[in-house]
């Protein structure tokens, strides 16, 4: 989802956001923490995890569902504080102008090992659609359609550029834009009927365990190498780490893994849990995983953060 800015810019951003030394209690003005969620379940899951932890530290997290372009405009306008879903390199065009203008701070990555590219059901892969170069040969079976997610998404824009440039011979294909859930519903129907379908897939996501799918090779020129291999970064509004140093350190500490995200997303999508409940369920079951995130972190009123979180979650 999602090339990197110059090392100098990234280094400067990290220096501003993380600071040095130990954390100190944040001022009361830092109590409300405003997150952007762009509607992808992985970002919903990580935002819910961070929000539940911050609530246990005495903060008041709030989340708005915004598109990627609006998220960055809101970070610049300082009406949003945090965005946990900066997929790179595919979001470079979205992020870099704001980074160059010093309107955002970049922390992380908060996740490595992700992928983001075209996927197909395994039966279609076994039938010969294994690479981007194979897609045009399956035009009739696919009805010249590629299923994406919400309009304005960086992945959709990559697909539209492929179509516009006739890359891989796909100039006469159409992009079907929908929500993440709308696209997955279409994938589910197609797989139950053993019908061909080409769609935008990614990991972490429970689609990888729910559906028998394969990722297509050969998309390096558009989605990047290693099947659209990606790192996900935390973005903060400019100055946030300096204004709220305890939060700045918290977001520096906050790192996820594919297993964690797949589990929490599965609880949301497959078990029907509300994101906050799914996050709390995982946090209660995995204190050894999240304890390092609280290293050097205090509650809003200046008390040690880790024992406060253990108490509020009811874990030892």
Image (cartoon, helix red, strand yellow):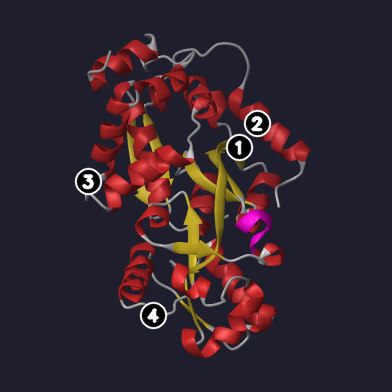
Q: Secondary structure at mark 3?
A: loop
- The percent position of residue 14, horizontal first and vertical second, equals 65, 31
Q: Is residue 124 left or right of residue 87?
A: left
Q: Which mark is residue 184?
A: none
C-alpha distance separating marks 1 and 2: 7 Å
Q: Residues within 10 Å of mark 1 (few under 14, many from 20)?
A: many
Which of the pair 269/122 is nearer the observer?
A: 122
**Relative to 9, residue 124 above or below:** below
Residue depicted at x 45% and y 43%? 80
Q: Earlier in the sequence, mark 1 or mark 4?
A: 1
Q: CA distance from mark 1 to mark 4?
A: 44 Å
Which segment is the magenta one? 223-227
Distance (Cα) linking label 4 and label 3:
30 Å
Mark 3 or 2: in front is 3
Q: Which residue occupies the extreme top position in the image?
A: 303
Say whether marks 4 and 3 touch (CB < 8 Å).
Answer: no
Q: Which residue is mark 4?
A: 195
Mark 2 or mark 1, which is nearer the start of the sequence? 2
Q: Position of residue 239 (x, y in %)?
A: 58, 32
- Label 2: state its secondary structure: helix
Residue 273, numbered circle: 3
Name the element at disc 1: strand
Q: CA distance from mark 1 to mark 3?
A: 32 Å
Circle 4/circle 2 CB separation < 8 Å: no
- Please report whichever mark, 4 or 2, sits nearer to the chain's N-terminal start: 2
Residue corresponding to mark 2: 14
Count neighbours of disc 3 (C-alpha within 10 A) and say few if under 14, some if 14 to 19, many if 20 or more.
some
Query: Residue 151: in sight, yes or no?
Result: no
Residue matched to label 1: 105
Q: Pick the quarter of the image with the N terminus.
A: bottom right
Q: Earlier in the sequence, mark 3 or mark 2?
A: 2
Magenta part, dominant SS: helix
């Amino acid at each position: 989802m999602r090339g990197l800015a110059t090392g100098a810019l990234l280094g400067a951003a990290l220096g501003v956001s993380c600071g040095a030394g130990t954390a100190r209690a944040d001022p009361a003005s830092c109590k409300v923490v405003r997150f952007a969620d762009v509607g992808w379940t992985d970002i919903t899951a990580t935002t819910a995890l961070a929000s539940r932890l911050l609530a246990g530290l005495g903060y008041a997290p709030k989340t708005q569902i915004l598109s990627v372009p609006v998220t960055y405009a809101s970070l610049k306008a300082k009406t949003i504080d945090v965005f946990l879903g900066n997929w790179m390199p595919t979001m470079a065009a979205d992020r870099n102008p704001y980074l160059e203008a010093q309107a955002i701070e970049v922390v992380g990555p908060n996740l490595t090992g992700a992928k983001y590219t075209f996927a197909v059901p395994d039966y279609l892969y076994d039938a010969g659609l294994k690479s981007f170069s194979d897609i045009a040969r399956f035009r009739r079976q696919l009805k010249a359609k590629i299923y994406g997610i919400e309009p304005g998404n960086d992945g959709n824009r990559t697909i539209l550029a492929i179509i516009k440039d006739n890359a891989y011979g796909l100039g006469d294909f159409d992009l079907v834009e929908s929500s993440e859930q709308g696209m997955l519903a279409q994938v589910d129907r197609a797989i139950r009927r053993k019908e061909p379908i080409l769609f935008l897939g990614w990991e972490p996501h429970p689609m990888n365990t729910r559906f028998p799918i394969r990722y297509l090779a050969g998309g390096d020129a558009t989605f990047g190498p290693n099947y659209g291999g990606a790192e996900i970064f935390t973005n903060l509004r400019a100055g946030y780490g300096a204004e709220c140093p305890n939060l700045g350190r918290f977001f520096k500490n906050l790192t996820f893994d594919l297993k964690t995200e797949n589990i929490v997303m599965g609880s949301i999508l497959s078990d029907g849990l509300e994101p906050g409940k799914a996050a709390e369920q995982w946090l209660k079951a995995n204190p050894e995983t999240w304890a390092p995130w609280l290293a050097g972190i205090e509650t809003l009123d200046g008390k040690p953060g880790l024992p406060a979180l253990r108490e509020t979650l009811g874990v030892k």
